[in-house]
Image (tube, grey):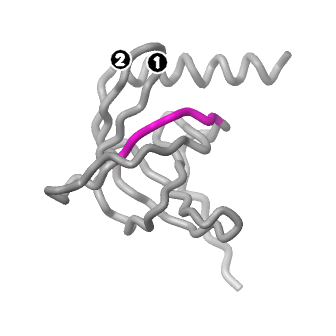
Amino acid sequence: MSIEKEKRRFIRHLLVSPLEFKIEEKEKNDFEKTQTVDVSEGGLMFMSKMDVEAGTLIEIKMPLYHKVFKIKAKVCHTEKDDSMGLFKIGVEFVTYTDAFKVKLIEQIYLIEEYRVL
């Protein structure tokens, strides 16, 4: 039995927030509406009806503080959640704006502050 080495550089924070995503390479591809499971400074996890192969580039639309940010991300792993009939998709951010990073860090800070209460 092997234990997989932890590859994350950032702490995950539970956050359920709406998001939309689509696979970049597909021409006729609508955005799938879903929600996040958790986020970090380096990426996030969300639920999907479809299995997306690791290494796939996707485009994400994520609302934060009354603004919708468009982010490019790469799928790192997928895991089937049999209880829900959905896939957990873990991604790392590839390209994003400084404004997005600031807003995401603000959101993470608020989550941490709430946990202390």
Q: Looking at the picture, how far across and down is residue 98, in whole percent?
A: 33, 20
Q: Give the farthest residue toward the right.
A: 117
Nearest the eye: 88 or 115: 88
Q: Looking at the picture, how far across and down is residue 32, in whole percent?
A: 39, 48
Q: Looking at the picture, how far across and down is residue 63, in whole percent?
A: 43, 25
Which residue is painted at 45% across and 37% down in the image?
Answer: 19
SS at mark 1 in the image = helix
Pointer 1: residues within 10 angstroms few (<14), some, or many (20+)?
Answer: some
- Amino acid type assigned to the residue bearing label 1 in the image: Lys
Residue 75 sits in which quadrant? bottom left
- Amino acid type assigned to the residue bearing label 2 in the image: Ala
Which residue is painted at 53% across and 48% down in the image?
Answer: 45
Q: Is residue 59 magenta?
A: no
Nearest the eye: 54 or 25: 25
Q: Give the farthest residue toward the left.
A: 27
Indicate which disc residue 99 carries.
2
Which residue is painted at 36% across and 46% down in the image?
Answer: 21
* Viewport quadrant of the N terminus: bottom right
Q: Is residue 107 above or below residue 50?
A: above
- Labels 1 & 2 near each other (Cβ < 8 A): yes
Magenta residues, start to end: 15-21
SS at mark 2 in the image = helix
Indicate which disc residue 34 carries.
none
Q: Looking at the picture, how far across and down is residue 28, in whole percent?
A: 17, 56
Pointer 2: residues within 10 angstroms few (<14), some, or many (20+)?
Answer: few
For the residues labelled 1 and 2, the Cα–Cα distance comes to 6 Å
Which residue was labeled with disc 1? 103
Q: Is residue 109 above or below residue 5?
A: above
Which residue is painted at 44% across and 51% down in the image?
Answer: 91
